[in-house]
Amino acid sequence: MDWTALGVSLRLGVGTVAILLPFGIWLGRLLAVRQFRGKVLVEALVTVPLVLPPTVLGFYLLVTFGARSPLGQAFQAIAGQTLPFSFEGLLLASAIANIPFVVQPIQRGFEAIPGDIRDAASCCGLTPWQCFRRIELPLAWPSLLTAAMLTFAHTLGEFGVVLMVGGNLPGETRTMSVAIYDRMQAFDDRSAGLMAATLLLVAVVTLMTTTMLSRQVRRRRD
């Protein structure tokens, strides 16, 4: 069992959720309640990481993060190291790959809130921010929870983007999925099976927790 790889995976999952959740709330609500030119394009771009093969997405991210790109050059000037094959680059790539897992559930949650609730809040003198904080967020909370849990579970199992952008650096970018691949390449079926079972257990517990908490929130709301 590669506990170091498990630690990297957990750190990557928590970091990805922390980065994406505020962004997902903003963009998900925007797509749910606003009509604007280019909305269909934005929704399509949000969905792209779901339909692109992970290796294709990883290739484009690797090019975007490379030393010849403006982003890669800026990061190297600030941090003194390249963005690819670093945990920071892996975290950024994971955040981009998981955008649909955050934005789409949150968008559906805000879409389920009737528009007349916002109108009533405005008539009662609530500002848009007060309406968002006191009314919309509590109503959309199950969707936010679902988005966070799905993103965490998906991050733990991500392989293609992780290997393309992060490589296989022990203690830095070697996640559990990459460690499983290494063990299979070495014909170590026992270790690979143990790590695969660990990821499966974490995924099942995460999804069960999401379902139970969502039901509790809905019962309290009803």
Image (cartoon, rainbow, N blue to C red):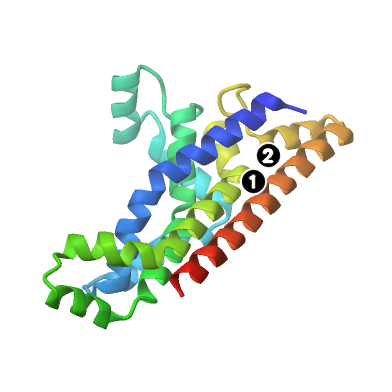
The residue lying at 46 percent from left, 45 percent from top is 17
Q: Quadrant of residue 119?
A: bottom left
How far is the residue under mark 1 from the one under mark 2?
6 Å
Between 142 and 36, the one nearer to me in the picture: 142
Give the secondary structure at mark 2: helix
Q: Is residue 151 above or below residue 112?
A: above
Decide if residue 107 is in sight here.
no
Q: Where 122 sits versus 209, above or below?
A: below
Type of the residue with mark 1:
Gly
Q: Is residue 203 above or below residue 144?
A: above
Labelled disc at residue 157? 1
- Label 1 sits on a secondary structure element that is helix
Q: Residues within 10 Å of mark 2 (few under 14, many from 20)?
A: many
Residue 121 horizontal side relative to residue 11, left or right:
left
Q: Is residue 199 left or right of residue 26?
A: right
Q: Position of residue 118 (x, y in %)?
A: 23, 75
Badge 2 is on which residue? 177
Q: Which amino acid type is shown beneath numbered disc 2?
A: Ser
Determine whether, in the image, residue 135 is placed left or right of residue 4.
Answer: left
Left or right of 26? Residue 50 is: right
User: Quarter of the image containing the N terminus?
Assistant: top right
Would residue 27 be seen by someone viewing this image from the given angle?
A: yes
Q: Residues within 10 Å of mark 1 (few under 14, many from 20)?
A: some
Q: Are marks 1 and 2 in contact (CB under 8 Å)?
A: yes
- The residue nearer to you, when weighing 151 against 56, is 151
Where residue 217 appears, as percent x and y from the top left, is 49, 64
- Residue occupying image coordinates x 19% and y 60%: 129
Q: Pinpoint residue 79: horizontal percent, then vertical percent.
A: 34, 20
Q: Nearer the viewer, residue 95 or 20?
A: 20
